């Protein structure tokens, strides 16, 4: 793709130019036939049209060649349009100097008898024709330039967003690993719990290291939760009451990877502190009117997380990834309801391949 920093004449490809050139002069020939027939009938209409169209075709090809010249491509602003004007006038005069003696030699009866009138008539007609061609030519180039500018701007934004997503994901994995290691530390006096936690951690890391796209089916995220919640169950034992309910349609909706994990980390961090034990956890996902709604509810009270404990980073990370991948229409809301904290995520539905039936599981 050409850079938008190039001047207008460089953006129209050779193939594009010839498509434009042939189309323009075919349309011009039809228009010329109509005008001559209705306003200035002549006997040899065919040859009059052929002469004028071929001359215009050749002169505009020369103009295009001039506009493609490195000297012209380096002109900008008023300097560029001055040289465009000079080239247009020069080729108009060239057309007159070519046809004027030929008309006299062939005794073509289409001009007045005055030599000056003949010269002016031919030059003005050709200049008018080239000016119209210039207007269309540079109009098309302007549209191409505008499209190229928007395309480059879009690519720049996408590159910036891709870079930001990579940084967010780089923050997410160490953040998760840090919390998992803290869980192992908290269970250090229970060898069986440590073994279960380590196994679930290994399974979850294996899952997270497999190739994934920017958006994955929610069903894949639910599978990952099995290992993550297993890691936490080894720590909480009977003090964890958890259930997952996901509709078949919800399983097919694509969501950012590791969407639910930061929410569960929040629940496991603050739920026991603010709501006592056992910790109750309810995860639901359903599709309504082409929107996926996910709710993660845990017993306890909402505590505004701070960046110092890593949870503020996790939630801010999640909000930002939702915006980058799904746009401003994707939302996340946190609210307190009596002795519960509910986090709701609402995103547009994007279907993928069919998945199994609804899941309603104790986790």
Image: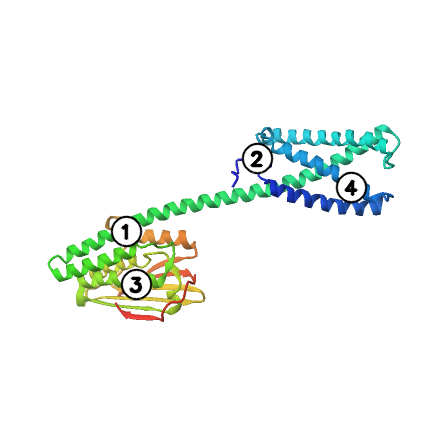
Numbered label attached to residue 157: none
> Which residue position is annotated with label 4?
50
Looking at the rendered image, the quarter that the C terminus falls into is: bottom left
Mark 4 vs 2, N-terminal side: 2
Q: Is mark 4 on a helix, strand or loop?
A: helix
**Separation of marks 2 and 3 at Cα, in angstroms:** 54 Å
Looking at the rendered image, the disc whose residue lies closer to the viewer, 4 or 2, is 4
Residue lying at the far front of the rendered structure: 106
Numbered label attached to residue 173: 1
Q: Position of residue 220 (x, y in %)?
A: 33, 61
Q: Do the residues labelled 4 and 3 touch (CB within 8 Å)?
A: no
- Left or right: 55 as drawn, with respect to 225: right
Q: Which residue is drawn at 18% across and 63% down?
A: 234
Mark 2 vs 1, N-terminal side: 2
> Which residue position is annotated with label 2?
7
Can you tell which quarter of the image residue 283 is in?
bottom left
Q: Residue at x 28, y 70 (%)?
A: 361
Looking at the rendered image, the disc whose residue lies closer to the viewer, 4 or 1, is 4
């Amino acid at each position: 793709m050409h850079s938008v920093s190039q001047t207008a004449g460089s953006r129209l490809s050779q193939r594009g130019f010839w498509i434009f050139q042939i189309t323009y002069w075919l349309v011009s020939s039809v228009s010329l036939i109509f005008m001559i027939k209705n306003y200035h009938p002549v006997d040899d209409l065919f040859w009059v049209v052929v002469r004028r169209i071929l001359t215009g075709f050749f002169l505009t090809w020369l103009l295009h060649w001039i506009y493609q010249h490195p000297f012209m491509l380096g002109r900008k602003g008023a300097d560029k349009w001055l040289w465009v004007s000079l080239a247009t006038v020069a080729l108009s005069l060239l057309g007159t100097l070519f046809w004027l003696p030929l008309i006299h030699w062939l005794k073509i009866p289409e001009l007045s008898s005055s030599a000056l009138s003949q010269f002016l008539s031919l030059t003005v007609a050709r200049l008018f024709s080239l000016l119209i061609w210039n207007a269309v030519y540079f109009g098309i180039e302007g549209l191409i330039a505008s499209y190229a500018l928007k395309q480059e701007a879009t690519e720049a934004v996408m590159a910036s967003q891709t870079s930001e997503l990579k940084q967010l994901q780089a923050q997410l994995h160490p953040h998760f690993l840090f919390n998992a290691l803290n869980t192992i530390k908290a269970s250090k006096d229970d060898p069986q719990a440590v073994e279960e936690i380590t196994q679930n951690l290994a399974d979850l890391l294996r899952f997270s290291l497999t190739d994934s796209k920017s958006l994955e089916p929610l069903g894949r995220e639910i599978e990952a939760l099995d290992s993550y919640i297993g890691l936490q169950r080894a720590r909480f034992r009977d003090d964890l009451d958890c259930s997952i309910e996901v509709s078949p349609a919800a399983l097919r909706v694509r969501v950012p990877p590791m969407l639910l994990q930061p929410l569960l980390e929040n629940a496991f961090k603050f739920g026991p502190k603010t709501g006592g034990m056992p910790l109750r956890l309810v995860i639901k996902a359903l599709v309504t009117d082409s929107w996926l709604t996910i709710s993660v509810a845990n017993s306890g009270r909402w505590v505004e997380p701070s960046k110092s404990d890593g949870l503020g980073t996790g939630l801010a990370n999640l909000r930002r990834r939702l915006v980058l991948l799904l746009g401003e229409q994707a939302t996340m809301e946190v609210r307190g309801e009596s002795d519960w904290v509910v986090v709701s995520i609402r995103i547009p539905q994007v279907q993928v391949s069919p998945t199994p039936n609804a899941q309603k599981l104790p986790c």
